[in-house]
Image: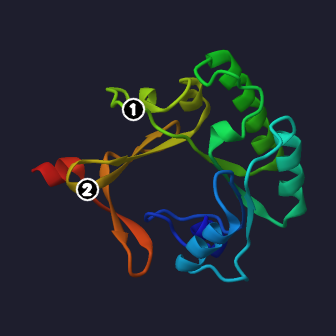
């Protein structure tokens, strides 16, 4: 979100600068503001934050109104998806999840915004990373890019992507610089093992 708001590259990839709408459904405003400030946020950065629970029967209309009320929204972050999506009684029900996500994708198309949504992982590892997402496989099937973060042995954190378009990022170490609060890509896990 900070990279988009400030127009700075993220993990070596360029971004389109614009406003960011961050729905932090499990967080408190003070905590979010503190984290954003640690990342270099200033009052000039176009990041708009909504914290706490949403009315699950009015999420899409409310989100559309928010996107239209702020200038140049390019990115919407929903943290977490299953606390936002309306019409899902059983997160493992493919039809329910697919229907809810189709409405969200329609909103993204109509408002010309990118929607990034966080989803938790299952506790057990799976051979196919898409099966490791908590909930229906409809989640993995609905998106253009899956960013899969893992915390592995010896504290190594990794990122893998599965892309509908473009090149995937193989499982690659994420390097965190606590001093400047930034993340960068390190070596691939295959490179580390060699």
Badge 2 density bin: few <14, some 14–19, many ≥20, Cα 10 Å: few
Where residue 73 sits, quadrant-wise, is bottom right
Front-lying residue, 172 or 29: 29
Seen from this angle, which residue lies furthest left? 194
Q: Residue at x 72, y 41 (%)?
A: 84
Q: Position of residue 166 (x, y in %)?
A: 48, 44
Residue 99: x percent and y percent? 73, 23
- Judge whether 113 appears above or below 136 on screen: below
Tags 1 and 2 in contact by the CB under 8 Å rule? no
Q: Which of the 4 image quarters holds residue 3?
A: bottom right
Residue named by callout 2 = 155
The numbered mark, 1 or 2, whose residue comes first in the sequence reads 1
Q: Quadrant of the N terminus?
A: bottom right
* Left or right: residue 163 compared with residue 142: left
Residue closer to the observer: 22 or 165: 22
Disc 1 to disc 2, C-alpha distance: 20 Å
Estimate the x, y position of residue 33 in percent, counting from the top left.
65, 73
Which residue sits at x=54%, y=31%? 140
Q: Which residue is mark 1?
A: 129
State whether residue 148 is above or below residue 16. above
Residue name at image x 73 percent, y 54 percent: 52
SS assignment at label 1: helix
Q: How many marks?
A: 2
Q: Position of residue 146 (x, y in %)?
A: 50, 41
| Residue 52 shown left or right of residue 124 in the figure | right
Q: Residue at x 64, y 52 (%)?
A: 26
In the figure, 25 relative to 99: above or below?
below
């Amino acid at each position: 979100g900070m990279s988009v708001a400030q127009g700075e590259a993220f993990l070596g990839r360029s971004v389109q600068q614009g406003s960011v709408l961050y729905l932090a459904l499990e967080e408190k405003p003070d905590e979010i503001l503190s984290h954003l400030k640690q990342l270099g946020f200033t009052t000039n950065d176009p990041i708009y934050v909504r914290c706490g629970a949403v009315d699950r029967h009015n999420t899409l209309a409310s989100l559309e109104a928010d996107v239209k009320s702020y200038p140049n929204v390019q990115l919407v972050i929903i943290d977490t998806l299953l606390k936002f999506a309306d019409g899902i009684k059983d997160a493992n029900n493919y039809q329910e999840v697919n229907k809810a996500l189709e409405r969200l994708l329609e909103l993204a198309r109509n408002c010309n915004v990118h929607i990034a949504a966080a989803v938790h992982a299952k506790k057990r590892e799976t051979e196919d990373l898409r099966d490791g997402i908590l909930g229906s496989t409809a989640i993995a099937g609905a998106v253009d890019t899956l960013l899969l973060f893992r915390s592995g042995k010896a504290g190594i954190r990794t990122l893998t992507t599965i892309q509908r378009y473009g090149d995937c990022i193989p499982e690659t170490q994420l390097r965190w610089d606590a001093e400047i609060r930034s993340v960068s890509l390190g070596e691939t896990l295959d490179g580390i093992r060699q």
